[in-house]
Image (cartoon, grey):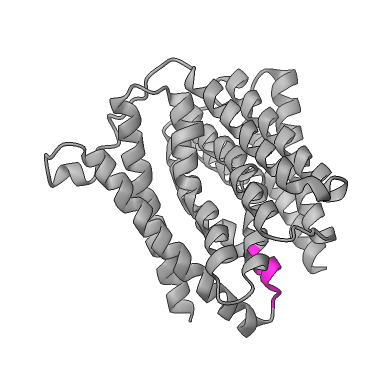
Amino acid sequence: MYAELLLSLIIVVIGCELFTNGIEWVAYRYRISACATGSLLAAVGTALPETILPIIAIFFAKEGGHEIGIGAILGAPFMLSSLAMFVGGLTIILATLAGRRKTKLNIDTTHIKLDLLYFMIAYILIVLISLFLHPFRDLLAFLLIVIYVVYAFKLLQVEGEIECSECGLYIGKISQSRNLDIIQTIVGLVLIWTGAKLFVDELSVVSHSIGIPLFILSFLLSPVATELPEKLNSVLWYWRGKDTLALGNISGAMIFQATFPVAIGMVFTQWNLGVVELISIALTLVSCFILYLYILIRKELSAYIMMGGGIIYLLYFLLVFL
């Protein structure tokens, strides 16, 4: 049981590493900017496990699919805005102590503010739909998709080029055939799908064995596990001082998670959110608003303010279990 769960996570991580590496080289070949690569291509690529997992849960799970799906859908943005920010801040501070960089992030604050603003707009709309506009959720779910499309279009207008000198294409080292970046990306996607399906089936078994409700387990465990690629990629980028890619990978994934997966959940489940779910949404918005306000006032972002995400995560954990 636990061995299968661990195996599924290993498959997901390998798949995401292949996908992310491949998509970076696709971006390099077509001269897409670092902002768009971090917040769009890499973000969507590493967000695939969190996206595919609830989709598989809702449509194909043997048991408790809707609970797992909603938990994973709402858990992903929460984890990214809290735990992932904390891990990023901690990485930067450790890199500073090692003499590799400073605690202040080298980012385009306009770009990050745009990411956070679009995310908060989408999440506030989710609150309105869940509390007051529930009968219109199918129509408004389409609006969430529109929000992401508009955001992606704006991002693709940003000029620039990503540097890929440190991230050689993995299968390019064993073959010189053409379009290997696309082939590797597809292989990564297949592995992600396979691992996610195995993870969903095993999660319900684990839930019964340890006596924790499916929503709580999927909310806390699924995003932590499936967001490993985002966290790992961002940690490496923060350590190397590539803050635009690192933070964009997180903030871009948050916007994607707040639109496409939520829209699917609204259309294909009852989407009746209780107090626990609404608290998670509220804390996610608080975390993002603090970051947005800090950048708006200070025109910069520090690792120490990112560390506050750990407090948000701990607060939710205490509220749920105590």
Q: Is residue 212 above or below residue 22?
A: below
**Vertically, is 68 above or below 212?**
above
Depth check: 253 or 295 in front? 253
At a point 25% along the width and 37% down the height, the residue shown is: 168
Along the horizontal axis of the image, is 302 left or right of 318? left
Locate residue 5, reporting x and y percent.
47, 72
Q: Tell me if residue 98 can be seen.
A: no
Determine which quarter of the picture holds residue 210. Answer: bottom right
Residue 72: quarter of image: bottom right
Q: Nearer the viewer, residue 139 or 60?
A: 139
Q: Position of residue 43 (x, y in %)?
A: 49, 39
**Residue 169 location, x and y as percent?**
25, 40
Residue, far top: 159
State the image coordinates of residue 176 (x, y, percent, origin top left): 11, 39
Q: Nearer the viewer, residue 322 or 278?
A: 278
**Does the stretch in magenta take in 226?**
no
Residue at (57% x, 46% y) in the render = 87
Residue 27 seen in this snapshot? yes
- Which quarter shows the C terminus? bottom right
- Residue stretch rendered in magenta on the structure: 212-218
Which residue reaches farthest bottom? Answer: 209
Query: Is residue 121 depicted above or below 311 in this figure?
Result: above
- Quadrant assignment, res 288: top right
Task: Tell me which residue sits at (55%, 21%) in the image.
Answer: 154
Residue 89 vertical position relative to residue 318 in the rendered view, above or below: above
How many marks the image carries: the answer is 0
The residue depicted at 48 percent of the width and 81 percent of the height is: 1
Most frequent secondary structure within the magenta stretch: helix
